[in-house]
Amino acid sequence: MSNIEIQELNGIEEVRYIPEGVCSKLFLMKIKDDIIIEMEAIGGCSGNLKGIGSLIKGMNIHDVASKLSGLPCGSRPTSCPDKISKAIE
């Protein structure tokens, strides 16, 4: 099974992404015309990920990916924000 599933319904892409190497277990996103409508994370640092979801709502996926890509978490070479960028790339 792939770690990403994308379904389209009425022009909205529903993305389910299972990240590896981070605390989060699942990212759920809705994207329409390259704009993030909604992002929810299961697991991980709840407050931080709710904040990130709120900040990226309404943003273009390309802008989000460029801002979040490559961010580490402590000594880890990746992070939940980095994995969000991977999910939307």
Image (cartoon, helix red, strand yellow):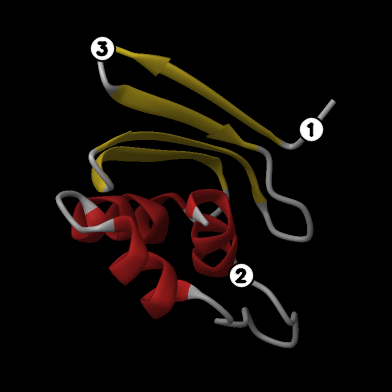
Label 2 secondary element: loop
Residue at the left extreme, as displayed:
58
Earlier along the polypeptide chain: callout 1 or callout 2?
A: 1
Residue sitting nearer the eye, 76 or 67: 67
Whether pointer 1 and pointer 2 mark residues with C-beta atoms closer than 8 Å, the reply is no
Q: Residue at x 14, y 50 (%)?
A: 58
- Residue to which mark 1 is pinned: 2
Q: Residues within 10 Å of mark 1 (few under 14, many from 20)?
A: few
Residue at which label 2 appears: 79
Q: Nearer the viewer, mark 1 or mark 2?
A: 1
Indicate the position of residue 60 as horizontal and vertical percent values: 24, 58
Q: Farthest residue toward the right?
A: 1
Mark-to-mark CA distance, 1 and 3:
24 Å
Read off the residue under disc 3. 10
For mark 3, does the 10 Å Cα neighbourhood hold few (<14), some (14 to 19), or many (20 or more) residues? few
What percent of the width, then of the height, locates residue 45? 50, 56
Amino acid beneath label 1 = Ser
Question: In screen coordinates, is 72 left or right of 8?
Answer: right
**Circle nearer the N terminus (1, 3):** 1
Measure the alpha-carbon separation of dots 3 and 2.
32 Å
**Residue name at image x 78 percent, y 60 percent:** 21
What is the secondary structure assignment of the residue under circle 3?
Answer: loop
Front residue of 88 and 43? 88
Kindly identify the amino acid type of the residue bearing the numbered disc 3.
Asn
